[in-house]
Image: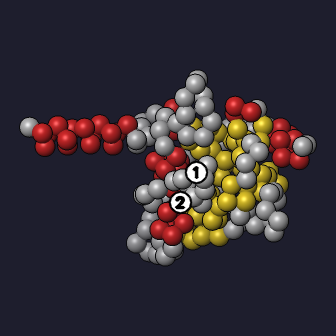
Amino acid sequence: MKLRRAHLLAAIVSLAATPASAGSILDYVGQCVPFARQASGIQIHGDAWTWWAKAKGRYERGQTPEIGSVLVFAKSPQLPLGHVAVVSRIVDRRVLMITHANWSRIDGERGHAERDVTLFDVSKAGDWSEVRVWYRDSHGLGATTYPTYGFIYGESASANVADAQPSPELTERHPDYVASLLDAYAR
């Protein structure tokens, strides 16, 4: 009986952590990893910071953003498990929009998906190794600089991994590019 309950509990937890494929990805509430997996089509599991190493040999990786690619945030004091976010728009050479989950508080709780969030490259080399992210609670870019590893692209590096297909819901029809640029440069 205990084993059956344990299996049932594990199944419930698993379902709660997996975005519903029938509904909108924007209705998702949970961790960033299952959200990024569904939104990008990139099939990597484990804590967010481990995605960079796990992608090696399976998916192409690099320092140049592409729509649908996943930016992998490194472990840091603020992000002990890292973070993953999907590129939804490229605004300019140092400003992106990302779609991700479990960042800002929405309706008083974390875990919700956010679409077309401003991300600013603040690295000295302009290589996306350090970024700032728009934070809903402060209504602007957060003051914290986060280290990143780079971008994982949906194209597979090997024949046995199917090409990833990002969700068509990654971006709005008319995202606010001007606000994104103001968030990044008008400090």
Query: Which amino acid, by three-letter code, is at mark 1?
Result: Leu
Residue 41 point in image, percent of width and height: 49, 54
Q: Can residue 24 be seen in this view?
A: no
Q: Is mark 2 on a helix, strand or loop?
A: helix
Q: Residue at x 66, y 42 (%)?
A: 171
Query: Which amino acid, by three-letter code, is at mark 2?
Result: Trp
Which residue is the extreme one toward the right?
Answer: 186
| Residue 100 higher or lower than 94, as above or below | above
Which residue is the extreme one toward the top?
Answer: 107
Measure how far apart labels 1 and 2 are at the Cα level. Answer: 9 Å
Residues marked 1 and 2 touching at CB (< 8 Å): yes
Question: Residue 75 versus residue 19: which sits nearer the camera?
Answer: 75
- 163 left or right of 141 in image: left
Tag shown at residue 79: 1
Tag shown at residue 49: 2
- 145 left or right of 178 in image: left
Q: Which residue is drawn at 40% across and 41% down?
A: 17
Q: Residue at x 63, y 36 (%)?
A: 104
Residue 67 point in image, percent of width and height: 66, 55
Q: Is residue 19 visible?
A: yes
Q: Give the quarter of the figure containing the N terminus.
A: top left
Colour pattern: secondary structure
Residue 180 point in image, percent of width and height: 81, 42
Q: In terms of sequence position, does the residue under pointer 1 or pointer 2 come before the other?
A: 2
| Residue 143 higher or lower than 124, as above or below | above
